[in-house]
């Protein structure tokens, strides 16, 4: 075969490879009031999906995001839940599926992130990181899978972190929780196959915390081979690829970090 020539249809006996068409799908995104979750919600709404925005405390921001989504001609609903509480997770999934009439896509985006210096980490800090960043995605997936199986399938995207592969000091519970989420992605993919595909996106330096100083930010950029910080749009494109781009990828974690993982 010569590169540049049309690809023979015989290479695809079951038809051209394709992912999920987003238009008309029902989507739940946890932690979607602000930041990366909001960007994912708006991007999926642009493609015609109906969106349930989960929030914990950011009610005003969630309702504003819902209004922006509705302005795109699709349905939007903001629902509150404490993801550290499994009963509230179950109720969130049920309310989302009921409001949407279906549940095709779950994006486990909600996360806590704060410094936890070794030697002063409390049990409460440890539990909060593991509850929100790891336990909640599992139970969201378990409850969502019930509806997805009834519909014949679905997609679950977990928002992990490159630190799950290469942890850094000062955030031990967080790094452990994200490493666990990467492992959870793989085991869920095996458990829910072949009808429900489960993948993860692991962002690198994107939307850094406000308490990072100039020297700290400069060091992060210097340690990133592409020599810049990422943007929410970089993460959004990865999520869209895993939803739209293929139905032959599951159990994979797509690292979006500007090469940070292979940096010095």
Image (cartoon, rainbow, N blue to C red):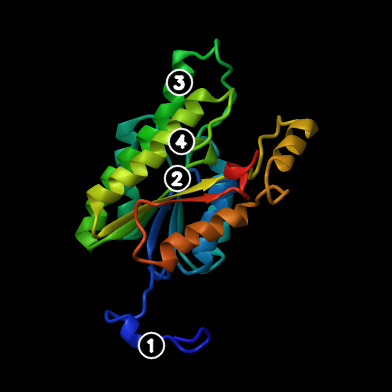
Mark nearest the camera among 2 and 1 is: 1
Q: Residue 146 in the image: state x and y as whole percent.
A: 22, 50
Mark found first going from the N terminus, 1 or 3: 1
- Element under disc 4: helix
Look at the numbered discs 2 and 1 and tell me whether their residues touch, using CB distance below 8 Å: no
Q: Which residue is mark 3?
A: 126
| Quarter placement of the C terminus | top right
- Residue 178 got which mark? 4
Q: Nearer the viewer, residue 130 or 13?
A: 13
> Looking at the image, is 145 positioned above or below residue 182?
below
Give the total of numbered labels: 4
**Horizontal and vertical percent position of residue 114:** 58, 27
The answer to whether residue 201 is visible is yes
- Which numbered disc, 1 or 3, marks the residue closer to the eye? 1
Tell which tag, 4 or 2, sits nearer the viewer: 4
On residue 30, the disc is: 2
Dots 4 and 2: beta carbons under 8 Å?
no
Left or right, 23 with reference to 235: left
- The answer to which of marks 2 and 1 sits earlier in the sequence is 1
Q: Residue at x 49, y 86 (%)?
A: 2
- The CA span between labels 4 and 3 is 13 Å
Q: Residue furthest right?
A: 214
Which residue position is annotated with label 1? 8
Q: Earlier in the sequence, mark 4 or mark 3?
A: 3
Q: Secondary structure at mark 3?
A: helix
Label located before the other in sequence (2 or 3):
2
Q: Which mark is residue 176?
A: none
């Amino acid at each position: 075969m010569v590169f540049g020539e049309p690809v023979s249809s015989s290479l695809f006996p079951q038809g051209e490879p394709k992912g999920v068409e987003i238009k008309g799908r029902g989507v739940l995104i946890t932690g979607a009031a602000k930041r990366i979750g909001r960007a994912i919600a708006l991007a999926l709404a642009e493609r015609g999906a109906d969106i349930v925005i989960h929030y914990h405390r950011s009610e005003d921001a969630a309702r504003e995001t819902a209004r922006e989504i509705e302005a795109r001609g699709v349905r939007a609903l903001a629902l509150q839940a404490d993801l550290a509480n499994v009963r509230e997770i179950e109720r969130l999934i049920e309310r989302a599926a009921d409001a949407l009439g279906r549940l095709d896509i779950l994006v486990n985006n909600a996360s806590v992130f704060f410094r936890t210096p070794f030697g002063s980490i409390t049990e409460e800090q440890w539990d909060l990181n593991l509850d929100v960043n790891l336990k909640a995605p599992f139970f969201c997936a378990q409850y969502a899978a019930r509806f997805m199986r009834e519909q014949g399938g679905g997609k679950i995207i977990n928002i992990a972190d490159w630190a799950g592969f290469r942890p850094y000091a000062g955030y031990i519970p967080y790094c452990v929780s994200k490493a666990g989420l990467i492992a959870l992605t793989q085991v869920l993919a095996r458990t829910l196959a072949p009808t429900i595909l489960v993948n993860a996106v692991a962002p690198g330096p994107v939307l850094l915390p406000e308490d990072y100083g100039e020297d700290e930010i400069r060091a992060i950029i210097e340690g990133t081979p592409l020599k810049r910080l990422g943007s929410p749009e970089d993460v959004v494109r990865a999520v869209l690829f895993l939803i739209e781009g293929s139905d032959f990828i599951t159990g994979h974690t797509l690292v979006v970090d500007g090469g940070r993982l292979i940096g010095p």
